Amino acid sequence: MLQADRALRHSAFGLLAVLLLSSCVRTDRPHAKLPPSKYPTLAAKSLPVFMKGTILEAAEIQNNEPYLVSGYGLVVGLANTGDNHNVPQAVVGAIMDEMVRHGLGSTDDRLKQYKPGQMIQDPKTAIAEVYAYLPPGGRSGQRVDVFVQAERHSQTKSLARGYLYQTNLYVGGVDSLNPKPKVNTYVKAGGALFVNPAYASESGKASLDKASLRTGTIMSGGIMTEDRPLWLRARTPQLAITRSIEMRLDQRFEEREGNIIAKTQDEGIVHVYVPRSFNGDWEHFVGVATHLYMDATPGSGAMKAKALAAEAVKPDAALMDISYCWEGIGEEALPSVQKARRRLAA
C-alpha cells in the first residue's frame, strides 16, 4: 500500500512537471507577425470638425493627373499642304505597315487604288503626331479631345481641312526611334480636324501663324478603350479600411449605375471609377466621394445634415465642403438643406 502511494505521488509530480515545462515552452514562443505593409502611414489630414468620419479623413486621392497617350497617324484631304520628305524613315515605315494592315493597296476593289507609297508622297497627305489625355477616373467608351500636329521633322505647311484616319494611341506612342505600335491601346482617335480659323486662310505672315497651321484639334475625336481608375490611398494601410471604403462607395453610387464604382487592390489602394451619371466630371465626383461619411446606419445621414445646416449659416462657413457632404448624404439631407437656404436668404 505504501509503495502504491509513493508511485501515485511520483506520477502526479511527473505530470505536473510535464505541464509546467510545456507551459513554459508555449509562453516563450514568439508571436507570429504579419509582414510589414509596403505602404508607409500617411500624416493625418487637418479637417474641420464637421468632416470627421468622412472618406477624406481615412484616405487621400491619387492618380488624379491627366495621363498622356500618343501615336503616329495619317491626315488626308489637305489642300496640297502636306510634305513628308523629312519624316524619319522608321516613322514612315510604321505608317506604311499600318496602311497595309488596314488593306490599302490590296486586291480589294475599294482599296487597291490606294497605294501606301504614293499616298505618303502625295501633298494632300501628312504624317502627324496624335495626342490625347486620359482623364482621371475615365471609363471605357468615354470620348476625349484629340490634339494633332504635323510630324515635327516634316515640312507640312498646314493641316487645315484635313481628316485623321483612325489612329491607336499608346503610352509613349510618339517615339521616332521606336514608332511601332505598343501592346496596350488606350484611345482610338480619328475624324475631321479643326484648325484655328484665324490662321486657316493662310493669310498670316508671322511665324507663329504658320506654326499654328500645323496643329489642329478633333473635339471628342477619341474613344477610350480601357478604364483608368482614380486611387484612394489609405492613410493607415489596413485591408479592413480599404474594404470599408470600397463598400461605402459602392453602397452610395452602385444602385443608380449598375456597375462597380470601387474595387480594393490591397491594404493601401482602392481603385475608384467615375459613375457615368457624372458625365466625365471627375472633379465633382471626387468632391462628393471624399466628403462621404463612412457611417451609413439609418438615420445617421439626417443627423449629419442637421449639423451641417448649423455650420452653413456661420460666418465664413466652408460652403463648398458642406455642399459636398450634403450631396454625399443624398435625399436625407434635403430638409436640412432647404432650412439652411431659407436662413441664408433671410
Image (tube, rainbow, N blue to C red):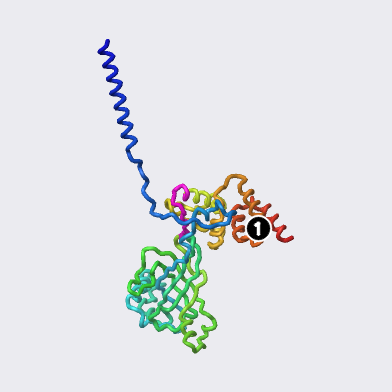
**Camera-nearest residue between 185 and 236:** 236
Vertically, is 153 above or below 223?
A: below
Vertically, is 179 above or below 82?
A: above
Was residue 298 drawn as part of the magenta stretch in this picture?
A: no
Residue 111 found in image quarter: bottom left
Was residue 233 drawn as part of the magenta stretch in this picture?
A: yes
> Which residue does the numbered mark 1 point to in the structure image?
312
Judged from the image, the secondary structure of the residue bearing numbered disc 1 is helix
Residue 309: x %, y % from top left: 66, 54
Start-end of magenta stretch: 227-242
Count of picture labels: 1
User: Which residue is at 46% across, 71% downward?
Assistant: 190
Left or right: 290, with 90 as reference point:
right
Residue 161: x %, y % from top left: 50, 79
Vertically, is 82 above or below 281?
A: below
**Camera-nearest residue between 193 and 63:** 63
The quadrant the N terminus occupies is top left
User: Label 1: few (<14), some or many (≥20) within 10 Å?
Assistant: many
Residue 157 found in image quarter: bottom left
User: Which residue is at 48% across, 77% downward?
Assistant: 216
Vertically, is 206 above or below 2?
A: below
The quadrant the C terminus occupies is bottom right
Residue 215: x %, y % from top left: 47, 78
